[in-house]
Image (spheres, rainbow, N blue to C red):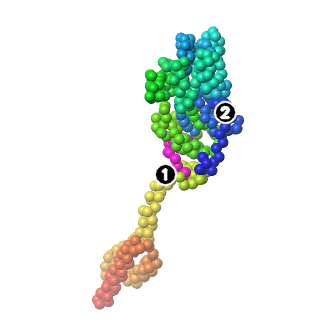
């Protein structure tokens, strides 16, 4: 963002819940928010920029814990205010698990590395981690023989019930190819992280944020295909207008040559002018024919006068009113001498003068013939 003269200040928070609160309180401008963390009322007050990556939901147990009782015991659900904490509570509640139900169930609000240490020390029996596979400590969830990442047989069902969840597969060997860790494919569910902002944040920033995310993420990752992120799909808050335009039309031409604030204004103006130009196109097409007709009309209108004079001469027979016809031809001559047209229409004007001269010569011959008689 520095390339565009924008200072980006990073703010450390407890997670998505706090990010949403800070956005609504106008204390931050843009935040990363896990899908599934916003209420409908909150989503109505915010706008999405793009989804940017998957965050798999890993259910991890102690190896000596009886998996038949995973829905009970001590469960690490993440730090208070984190997106993982909110999501874990919702998923467990959907399975009928809450504090004290089944009997002996306790929610332990620790996350990340602290939760891993608590698992190893036997302080918790299982944990729900909403995280990235790229973090160093996540490897230990797969490599520690005392821990077990659960294969979630209901992953597809969860993705159908929750529109913000995706069923993904962690393929065998993804964590460590040499040692083939994990040894088998593991089905899990994943949420998506989105860039979210307030509607009153300057919309010129949105294309820059998407372009920056695309530059970082276009090659894909362990769980995302190349070009999959950033994406307009999977957002919870409505997509910002500037983001929708970016994903539909691509980056504006103006962003390559103008400062971002002017580029945004130029893009908006071009969008407004496009329908107008579409309506104007038929009028523009008619300019050429209209211009040609106007110039030709300045010449051709005198042909009707010459045609009338010629018919009058033909109908007069031997009794021709030479004086009156001569005056009319002289009047036409004076008029057409003052006609000026562009060079491309000069041939028409020359032809008119030639026809006028022929009528004058015909009238003079008739006068000579009459005098001789």
> Magenta segment, principal secondary structure?
helix
- Front-most of residues 291 and 210: 210
Which residue range is magenta in the image? 243-255
Q: Residue 343: x and y, percent?
A: 41, 73
> Residue 88's image quarter?
top right
Rendered location of residue 63, percent (x, y): 54, 16
Real-space Cα separation, disc 1 to disc 2, in angstroms: 49 Å
Mark 2 secondary-structure assignment: loop
Q: Is residue 370 visible?
A: no
Give the labeled residue for mark 1. Answer: 278
Q: Which residue is drawn at 42% across and 80% down?
A: 333
Q: Mark 2 points at which residue?
A: 13
Q: Earlier in the sequence, mark 1 or mark 2?
A: 2
Q: Is residue 335 above or below residue 289?
A: below
- Image coordinates of residue 278 in percent, x first then y, are 48, 51
Q: Which of 295 and 171 is in front in this view?
A: 171
In-image side of 82 versus 146 (left or right): right
* Residue 211 falls in image quadrant: top right
């Amino acid at each position: 963002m520095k390339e565009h003269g924008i200072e980006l200040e990073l703010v450390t928070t407890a997670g998505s819940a706090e990010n949403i609160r800070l956005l609504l309180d106008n204390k931050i401008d843009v935040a990363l928010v896990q899908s599934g963390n916003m209420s409908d009322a909150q989503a109505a007050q915010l706008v999405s920029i793009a989804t940017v990556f998957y965050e798999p939901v890993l259910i991890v147990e102690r190896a000596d814990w009886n998996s038949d009782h995973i829905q009970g015991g001590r469960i690490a659900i993440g730090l208070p205010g984190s997106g993982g904490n909110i999501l874990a509570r919702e998923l467990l509640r959907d399975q009928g698990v809450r504090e004290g139900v089944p009997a002996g169930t306790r929610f332990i609000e620790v996350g990340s590395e602290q939760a891993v240490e608590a698992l190893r020390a036997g302080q918790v029996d299982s944990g729900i981690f909403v995280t990235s596979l790229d973090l160093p400590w996540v490897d230990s969830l797969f490599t520690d023989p005392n821990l077990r990442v659960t294969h979630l047989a209901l992953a597809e069902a969860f993705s159908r019930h929750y529109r913000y969840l995706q069923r993904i597969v962690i393929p065998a060997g993804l964590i460590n190819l040499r040692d083939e860790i994990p040894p088998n494919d593991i089905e899990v569910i994943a949420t998506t992280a989105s860039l979210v902002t307030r509607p009153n944040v300057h919309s010129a920033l949105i294309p820059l944020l998407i372009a920056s995310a695309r530059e970082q993420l276009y090659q894909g990752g362990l769980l995302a295909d190349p070009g999959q992120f950033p994406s307009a799909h999977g957002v919870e808050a409505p997509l910002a207008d500037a983001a929708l335009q970016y994903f539909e039309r691509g980056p504006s031409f103006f962003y390559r040559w103008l400062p971002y604030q002017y580029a945004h204004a130029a893009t908006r103006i071009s969008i407004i002018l496009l329908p107008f130009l579409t309506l104007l196109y038929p009028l523009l097409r008619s300019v050429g024919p209209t211009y040609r007709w106007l110039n030709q009309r300045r010449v051709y209108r005198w042909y009707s006068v010459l045609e009338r004079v010629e018919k009058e001469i033909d109908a007069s027979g031997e009794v021709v009113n030479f004086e009156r016809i001569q005056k009319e031809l002289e009047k036409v001559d004076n008029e057409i001498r003052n006609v000026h047209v562009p060079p491309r229409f000069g041939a028409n004007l020359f032809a008119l003068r030639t026809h006028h001269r022929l009528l004058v010569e015909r009238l003079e011959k008739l006068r000579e013939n009459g005098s001789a008689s």
